[in-house]
Structures are given as structure tokens and as C-alpha cells.
Amino acid sequence: GGRVLLDGAAEYTSDPFALPPGTVHVAGVDMHGTVADTKELEPLRHLTGLRELFVPARVWSPASDIKAPYSDEVFDFFSGMKHLERFQAGLTTLAWLDLWDAGLVRMAPLAQLKDLRVSLSTMKDPKSLAPFVNLEFLDLSDTYVTDQTMTALAGMKNLRRLTLLGTLVTDEGIKYLQDLTQLEVLDLYGVKITDKGLRYLRKLTKLKELNLLGAQITDESAAILAQFKELRALNLYRSRLTNAGLAQLQQLPHLELLDVRYTGVNRSGLEAVRAARPDCKIAFVSIAPPGTYARGNERPKGAGQKALTVWIRALGGDARVADGDIQAISLARTNFTDAQLAYLKALPHIERLNLEATDVSDAGLVALTKLVTLRELNLSFTSVSDRGLANLGGLVNLRRLVLSGVRVEGAGIQSLNGLTQLQELDLTSSPVKDLGLVHISKLAALEKLAISNSDITDAGLENLSKLSNLSSLDLRGTDVTDAGLEKLSYVASLHNLNLSHCRFSDKGLAHLKTLAHLERLSMFRTKVDDAGAAQLAEFKSLRAINFDYTKLTNKGIDLLKMLPHLEELGLDSTEVDDHGAQLLASISTLKSLDLYHTLVSDSGYRAIKSALPQCQIFWDKDSSLTSRRKL
């Protein structure tokens, strides 16, 4: 399922028939999106002339009962590639990479690397980055990087592009960038630096793109920004800039894009800059009606829910009011803090609260203990951990709790056992372990559970059999094997199951035959093929199946047509061709069919369309060509 770049070629190819006869020299390997185990990657060690290598987010262990993705030995395979210039691990997803410092350290001999991407990984030791002094491009977005990690970057004098999006770096870490004078692109999206931190950047006069979204900078930093004469794009979204600071940015001669949405800039300041710089595209949204913004929005200006509503909207959030009472608040992606959360603790009728991607942490959650009317709470991508969950145990009316991308591993979930009405729990991309499933199994009312890209194992899944109301389960990107599917066979209430990016086999699907109510099954990018379709042909309750990026062929379609209620079928990048199209045309129950990147031709598509006029078909002529398939 990967692609190669031949020496001298302009583009990667995934079509083996496009390769020239005889010996070929491979310059690049792209395995993003593939599923492989360690031994399948070992032959890469012989490609010592590689200049580019892109490996997948997860490497499966061949031992089905052991979770060991990205074992250290994998990186030994790459350590002899003395010509390697670009190395990227992972996909553009929210899946955490199982890449630790011990693995990256094994690539220390590759000091010639120029481009390194390890975003969404768990590395943070500066020693693992220190050898790469020749880097020109470095992506550390959404890693565990701290101020201490940043010490390694001080020696990377050739860096031209650096991404620190979503890291825990502060002003103290930013100071290690002060001598990287070759930097042209710096992405500090979500990094909470202040004017002090920006002062460390004053020598970076070659910057062309600077992303300071969410930075706590004020007009004091405008004078420094005005010295970056090469800037083309500047993002100051939700900073504390006002009209006075904006006026100083008129001096930037090459500025093409400027984002000052939800800052202290008002309409008059905006129009002044637009008049002076008509060539610059400026993004602007006022945080409040004219005249209401002023520095000091840290607290409401007055008592009562009306003042609270005005304050929330001034912060860039929203509040829904009914009969004079606030019933719902969204402060998602604002600079809302623990201290400010205290002003919400006395809302007698609030039902929904969204604090996604705010600055809220465990310390602030004590303010939620009195909001007993809450029915929905979203704390995704905050600094909440197991410890903070203790403050949620008394919210007995909660129906939905979203904890995606937080630092919850499982012990704190025990504090939620008193939430007898909780129906939906989302822990996507949080490092939940099997202990968490032990506590989750006591949430008797739970109907929907999402634990994709977590650290659960087959053994932990046995706890889910206690959830007699569980109808929807998302296990994408976890280490579920055939043994895990055997555990799931006892969750009799399941209607919807997502097993995409898991590593079970066709044989393992047989365990799910006991799920008499299973209607939707997703197996995107798994090793399922026609043998798996043979198993599923006996699942008479199935209404929707996703086979995208699997090895399903026409033979599998011939088996699936026996399903009496099949309405949705995903076949993107499978081996189905026009013969398969004829078989699909006979499935009269189909309402949705994805045929992108298959071998179905225009005539095959038209045949299905004619036979199934009620079916929405996703297909286009170009994607059906072998040379265009995204394998």
C-alpha cells in the first residue's frame, strides 16, 4: 500500500506496472497510511541510498497479545541511511505516535538529516534531538516538548521552518530560538507566550511567516513585529493587540496576510490599516460590539447573568439564554483560564458547557462541582488529567462527557462511577489504559463509548461485557486483535462498531457473529479481504460496512450481496472492477456506495446508477484509473 520515488523521477508512484524494467534506484519511500509489523519494515535497511522516508503512525507487533508499536529496533533499520535527508513519522491525524525518545536516539548517526517530522509523538528528551544539527525543517507539533526539550534546538543554526503547534513550551523555552537567525517560518499556534517570549525572537529578521494564534502578547510586542520586514503572513488571532499596535504593523512592506480576529482591534483601527495597506488581506472579527472591549476582560463587569453573558461574548465565546437564565455556554478555542472558570460556578440552570481547547486544567475544575444541572460537558484538548476528574463525580445529571486529547490514563475514571445517567463518553486520542476500562464498565447507563487511538489492549475489552446498554463503540487505531474480537462477542447490545486501523484478521471476525443487533461495521485500512466478507455474509443484521483501503475483490462482493438489509457500502481503494459493479447492481437495498479509487469504469458506474437510481454513488472517472489510485 505504499509508494516509491525513483531516482530522477518527479513524482511518487504506487503502481508497480509503472516501474521501468531492470534495476531501479529508489530515492524515496512513502508508507503513510499503511499497516505493517516490525519484520515487514526490516527490508528498508537495505535501501541505504534513500533520501526520503515516510513511515506510518503505528507499527504493529507480530505478537498479538503484546502492545509494542514502534519498538526501538525499528529505528535501527533506518540508522544506516547515510543519504537520508527527509524523515517523517505518522499521519495527519489525531492519533498519537508510539514514538519515544529511545527510538529516536537510535537515529543519531543521521546527523545529515534536513527535514524531520515527529508530530503527535511522545518524545521530549532534548538528547534525542541534539544530534540533528543540520536540520532545516522540524515539526514538533502536538508533542510532549517542554522548555527543557528546547535546549536541543539552540544548536540547529540552519533551521528555516519550525512548528511547535500545541506544545507546552513557554517563554523560557522560546529563548532557545533567539539565535536561529535563518528561520523563515515559525508556527507557535496555541503556545502561550507573552511579550517576554516575543522579545527573544527580535533577531529573527528573516521570518516570512509567523503564527502567534493564542499568544498573550500586547501592543508592547508590536514594535518587535514591525522589525520583521520580510513577513508575508502574520497570525495574531486572539492576541491582545489593539488599534495602537496594529498601526505599527503598517510598516511591514511585504505583508500579504494578517489575522487580527478576536483581538482588541476595532472597526476604526481596521479601516485605518486597510486604507494604508490595500494590498494586505486582513481577517477581522470583533470580539464585542463597538465600545465594549477594554483591557481587563479577565472578569465580568458587574453581577448577574446578563453581565456574565456580555463577558462571555466579549471573550469570543457564546451563551444561550432562555427565560433570563444561561442554559448553554461555549468558550471553545478561547484563552479561557482556570481563574475565569470560577465566575461560572453559580449558574443554577446551565445544561451544556463547552471548554474545548481552552487553558483550563485540573486546578480549575473545582468550579464545576456546583453545576449539578449540567447534561453535557466538553473538556477536550485541555490540560485535564486523571486527578481533575475527581471534581466531576458529583455532576449526577451528566449525559455526555467529552475528554478527547486529554491526559487521562484511567485511574481518575473511578471518580465518575456515580454518574448513573452518563450515556456518552468520548476519550478519543487520550492515553487510556485497561484500568480505565475497568472503571468504565461500572457506568451502567453508557450507550456510546469512543476510545480510539488509546492504549487499551485485548485483555481490557472483557470489561465491556458488563455494559448492557452499550450500542456504539469506537476502537479505531487501537491494538485490537482476534483475541479482542472474542471479548467483544459478549457485548450483545452493540449496534455500531468501528475497528478501523486495528490488526485483527478475517478469522477473528467470526467471533462477532453473536452480535445479533450489529448494524454498522467499519474496517477502514485493516487486513480484511474476501475471507472476511465470507464471515460477514452471515451477519444478517448488517446495514452499513466500510471496507475502504482493504483487499476486498469482486469475490467478496458476491458474498456480501446475500445481506438482506445492506444499505451503505464503502469500497474506496479496493480491488473491485466492472464485474463487481454488476454484482453491486443486484443489491437493491443499497442507498450509499463509495467507489472512489476502484477499478470500476464509466460504463460500470452507469450500469449501477441505472439499476439503483435510489443509491447515492461516490465515483469519478479519474479516480478509477490505476495510475491515480491512492493505495
Image (tube, rainbow, N blue to C red):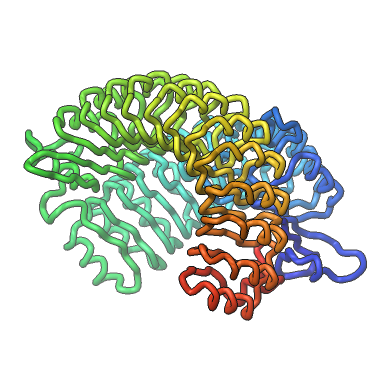
Image quarter hosting the N terminus: bottom right
Quadrant housing residue 67: top right
Expressed as whole percent of the image width and height from the top left, the position of residue 28 reads 75, 58
Expressed as whole percent of the image width and height from the top left, the position of residue 169 reads 46, 36
Image quarter hosting the C terminus: bottom right
Left or right of 130: which side holds 184?
Answer: left
Residue drawn at x 82%, y 68% as measured from the top left: 19
Q: Nearer the viewer, residue 559 or 206?
A: 559
Position above or below: 580 against 451: below
Left or right of 10: which side holds 288?
Answer: left
Expressed as whole percent of the image width and height from the top left, the position of residue 288 reads 17, 52
Left or right of 402: which side holds 345?
Answer: left
Q: Is residue 34 at all visible to an observer of this figure? A: no
Quadrant housing residue 562: bottom right
Position above or below: 161 against 74: below
Expressed as whole percent of the image width and height from the top left, the position of residue 523 reads 60, 48
Position above or below: 121 against 280: above
Q: Nearer the viewer, residue 377 or 614?
A: 614
